[in-house]
């Protein structure tokens, strides 16, 4: 009876050791990483100017950087633009 317990413990230790060895990796991966995401609906176009679908805007928002963006308080801050002026009526940005 005692011999079978020792054999069982030895087999369990060997199995645990093999499992831990299989989980480890001796090589470090420096490869580029790719981000993938699955959308529920396919976009009808990638032309963000003509499309009003949410599926298109959620894709193109990650591809296109605007000239200006808003900070946490809603103020305009530069994104790609280096400088700009706003008309007196607040409707034209140049």
Image: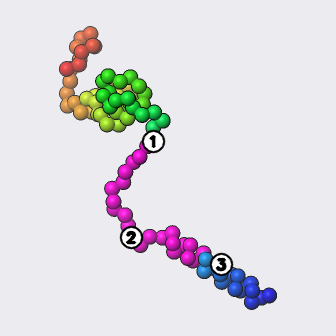
Give the residue pinned by disc 1.
38
Q: Which residue occupies the extreme bottom position in the image?
A: 3
Q: CA distance from mark 2 to mark 3?
A: 27 Å
Say if 87 sits above or below 31 in the image: above
Looking at the rendering, the stretch of residues picked out in magenta corresponds to 16-38
- Which is nearer the N-term, disc 2 or disc 1? 2
Q: CA distance from mark 3 to mark 1?
A: 41 Å
Q: Label 3's element? A: helix
Q: Is residue 29 visible?
A: yes
Q: Quadrant of the N terminus?
A: bottom right
- Which class describes the residues within 10 Å of circle 2: few (<14), some (14-19), or many (20+)? few
Give the number of the mark in front: 3 or 1: 1
Q: Label 1's element? A: loop
Give the residue pinned by disc 3.
12
Q: Which residue occupies the extreme right position in the image?
A: 1
Whether 75 is among the magenta residues is no
- Chief SS of the magenta region: loop
């Amino acid at each position: 009876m005692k011999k079978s317990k020792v054999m069982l413990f030895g087999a369990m230790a060997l199995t645990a050791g093999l499992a831990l060895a299989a989980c480890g990796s001796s090589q470090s991966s420096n490869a580029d990483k790719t981000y993938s995401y699955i959308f529920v609906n396919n976009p009808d176009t990638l032309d963000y100017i003509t499309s009003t679908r949410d599926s298109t805007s959620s894709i193109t928002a990650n591809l296109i950087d605007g000239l200006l963006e808003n900070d946490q308080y809603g103020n305009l801050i530069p994104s790609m633009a280096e400088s700009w002026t706003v008309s007196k009526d607040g409707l034209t940005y140049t």
